[in-house]
Image: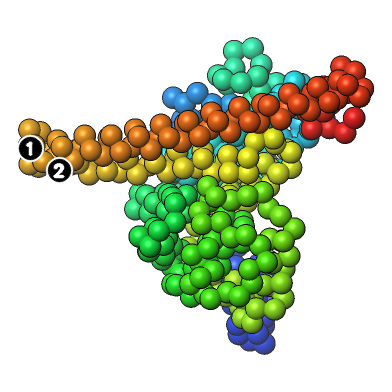
Amino acid sequence: MKMVEVTLGWVKYWFPEFELTWLGEEMRTNLPKEMDFTLEARNAERTIKDFKSIQTSLYIPDTITATKRVLIMEYIQGGRVDDLEYLADAHIDRNKVALELSRIFNQMVFVNGWFHADPHPGNLLIRPAPKGSRSPFNFEIVLLDHGLYFDIDPILRVNYAKLWLSLIAPASPATTLDRRKYAELVGNVGPDLYPVFEAALTGRAALQSSVDSVKEDDRSCRRASSIIDLQPQSKAELDAIRNAVVSTEGLLTSVFDVLRRVPRRVLMVLKLNDLTRSLDYALMTTHSNIRIFLITAKYCTYAVWQDERKRLIDAMIHKGIFNFPLLRGCFSCWWKFRRQYAKLVIGEIFLDLQAIAIIKKAWVKGLWRKGFQGAHQAAAGLAY
């Protein structure tokens, strides 16, 4: 640990613009937590309680015994969540796996306020749902390695939800202001660093309003006005990103500046975003690239509604339950929530029908070329 800190100190001395000493501080704080297996057992137990009343495919292995240096847990046999052959053999729908992963992690961040902070495919297994499973699907997603969790305070959680909703909302001057407002509240970044922060959130090139704000000249790829407007990532967009990294003066310095400014909890949440996006790609899903963003929007909408509801209930306790303006405000917030949520559900149904049609088309094509075996492989996203 000392060697890491010394090395980062020398990096800062010779290259002051690349400030990475915060990384050493984080390692010093978090490594001891990951080495304490009693803490890991408590984290697993809390996660089980958080999902106890929710119909979910998430499964946490039982803890048999835990000491500070020894942890014995239930043995789970399964495959990697992105192993398409394993999923095909078990007749598991890869689209549903990607969507359920997004639901699990969004539930952690936006509703529970307590999330797994070391997400990567090695910490996830998938298996056919055993007899008596609570999963609504024919599979369970097993989450491993509970050594590092973070909580998110309610204010940060709600502001983060509002930031996502502003990114998903249609572009307008008011929406653009909201995006920058909540980016500063969540990520501690000003207008100059906002495009970099936005790209880190979405994993895509900056949206139109961000490009205009920094007067970027590259128009080689179509810029979306909101996340819902995003098209599948094209070669032109990838080239634009590469060109920006290479030719834009100070861009790498801005990236390091964002990493230094953003609260550590938010950085860990960005890792969750990266995981769900990368697994959606690795699973070769047939739904639209914005499908998992609709799930995020649903959880954000719910989180904002719950915050408004709590605020109004607290006001009623102090001013009286029959306060007409408060009752009207409560109904107005509820109606706005139900209307937004219904729109998202309708969008999900439409995209899911499109995804099913693509799978059916692949099945027919595989059947025509290689018979039923080819149809099964084609529908599973495998070569045939």
Type of residue at label 1? Asn
Question: The residue under label 2 is which amino acid type?
Answer: Ala
Residue with the most extreme top position? 131
Q: Position of residue 290 (x, y in %)?
A: 58, 44
In the rendered view, would you say 141 is above or below 67? above
Please indicate, yes or no, whether residue 47 appears anywhere in the rendered image: no
Mark toward the viewer: 1 or 2 = 1
Q: Residue at x 54, y 69 (%)?
A: 211
- Please give the name of the residue rendered at 65% of the width and 85% of the height, measured from the top-left corner: 15
Q: Residue 236, how many percent across, how many down?
A: 72, 61
Q: On the picture, is 154 further left or further right than 51?
A: left
Mark 1 lies on a secondary structure that is loop
* Mark 2 surroundings: few (<14), some (14-19) or many (≥20) residues within 10 A: some
- Residue with the most extreme right position: 370
Task: Say whether residue 264 is visible.
Answer: yes
Left or right: where does residue 255 sit relative to residue 239?
A: left
Which quadrant is the N terminus positioned in?
bottom right
Q: Which mark is residue 315?
A: 2
Q: Residues under labels 1 and 2: Cα distance?
A: 9 Å
97 to 139, vertically: above or below: below
User: Residue 17 versus residue 331: which sits nearer the camera?
Assistant: 331
In this picture, residue 340 sits left or right of residue 116: left
Residue 305 rendering spot, x and y as whole percentages: 32, 40
Q: Secondary structure at mark 2?
A: helix
Q: Which mark is residue 323?
A: 1
Task: Please report the residue visible at 90 percent of the width from the left and 18 percent of the height from the top.
Answer: 371
Q: Are marks 1 and 2 in contact (CB under 8 Å)?
A: yes
Q: Position of residue 219 (x, y in %)?
A: 63, 68
**Which image quarter: residue 9?**
bottom right
**Residue drawn at (51%, 38%), measured in percent from left and top?**
295
**In the rendered view of the protein, which quadrant contains the C terminus?**
top right
